Amino acid sequence: MRQHGRLYLALIVMGVTWGVTPVLVKIAVSTGHHPFGLIVWTNLVGTILSGVVTFARGRRLPISLPYLKLYLGVALLGAVIPNLLNFTAAAHLPAGIMSMLIALVPMFAMPVALVMGFEKPSLIRFLGALCGAIAILLIVGPDTGLPDASKIGYVFIALGASLCYGGEGNFLTWFGMRGLDPVQVLFGASLVGLIIAVPLAGFTGSFIPLDNLGAPELALFAASVISWGAYATYIWVIAKAGPVFASQVAYLVTGFGVIWAMLLLGERYSIWVWAAFALMLVGIAMVKPHKSD
């Protein structure tokens, strides 16, 4: 029971902190920074933070082939590709809508987990995920979500990020963490992500200089630090309770993301959004950790 309480507390903390990142990302992309340039800095921050913590604890970063495969999988599914999609969509969609679309992560994670045998069929878990799906329908329905119908294409771009996150959790469960702790995994993944992003930023001429730090650049660094801490916690929860339970953090990120967007950006939503938020809370309550945890 105590372990279950720790898992739920971890979800709440991740929801509150991760929920503010769409607002910060919205500010970061407000001046037209290219996604590749943003990805370079987010991975650099992750590499520095993870490296300091790893070496301070007297640990190292293994670099043999199995570990490189782990780092590459996490880098692609958890950082480079979803960040590219999120940064692209964030320039065109409200921060609150970006938060709401994250709630689709469990809908991508659950069927993959079932097929791969990581989760047993459960009516309660299915209904919990269904609540999240219905909530999304309420949010993106007529007169409830998008301020401009022409932006619908960017919704699907953002959904691609949710697909990546859902696949990442199952990748970690399938491939395993090879005896590494979450910070070591993030260290390796951030470093690999940086190696991937730097040439792309150079090729597109999208490096972001630091000679004139303003609100967008500071927002980017704040989002990077917050995401790093929340992401390390996310990997820990996956190891303890499985990918489907961990992916339920998307509901809380959505709820708190809407609240942060209202408080910091002045975004406003209809009663349907609040109904969707209630459904998200029901959904997370219906997904329990494994009994063996």
Image: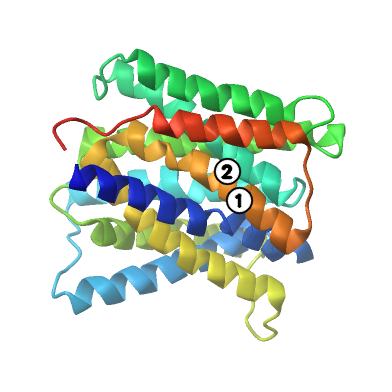
| Three-letter amino acid code at the position of disc 1 | Gly
**Helix, strand, or loop for circle 1?**
helix
In the rendered view, tell whether residue 126 sits above or below residue 27: above
C-beta proximity under 8 Å, tags 1 and 2: yes
Q: Quadrant of the C terminus?
A: top left
- Give the residue at x 69% y 51%: 95
| Three-letter amino acid code at the position of disc 2 | Thr
- Give the residue at x 75% y 48%: 94
Q: Which residue is mark 2?
A: 254
Q: Dot 1, how many residues are within 10 Å of its Cα: few (below 14), some (14-19), or many (20+)?
A: many
- Give the residue at x 17% y 60%: 62
In the rendered view, tell whether residue 247 sits above or below residue 19: above
Q: Nearer the viewer, residue 80 or 182?
A: 182
Q: Which residue is mark 1?
A: 257
In the displayed structure, does residue 290 sit left or right of residue 216? left
3D distance between C-alphas at marks 1 and 2: 5 Å
Q: Dot 2, how many residues are within 10 Å of its Cα: few (below 14), some (14-19), or many (20+)?
A: many
**Helix, strand, or loop for circle 2?**
helix
- Give the residue at x 24% y 25%: 118
Task: Locate residue 161, reporting x and y percent.
Answer: 54, 39
Task: Locate residue 25, reporting x and y percent.
Answer: 64, 59
Q: Nearer the viewer, residue 117 or 282?
A: 282
In the rendered view, tell whether residue 268 sits above or below residue 275: below
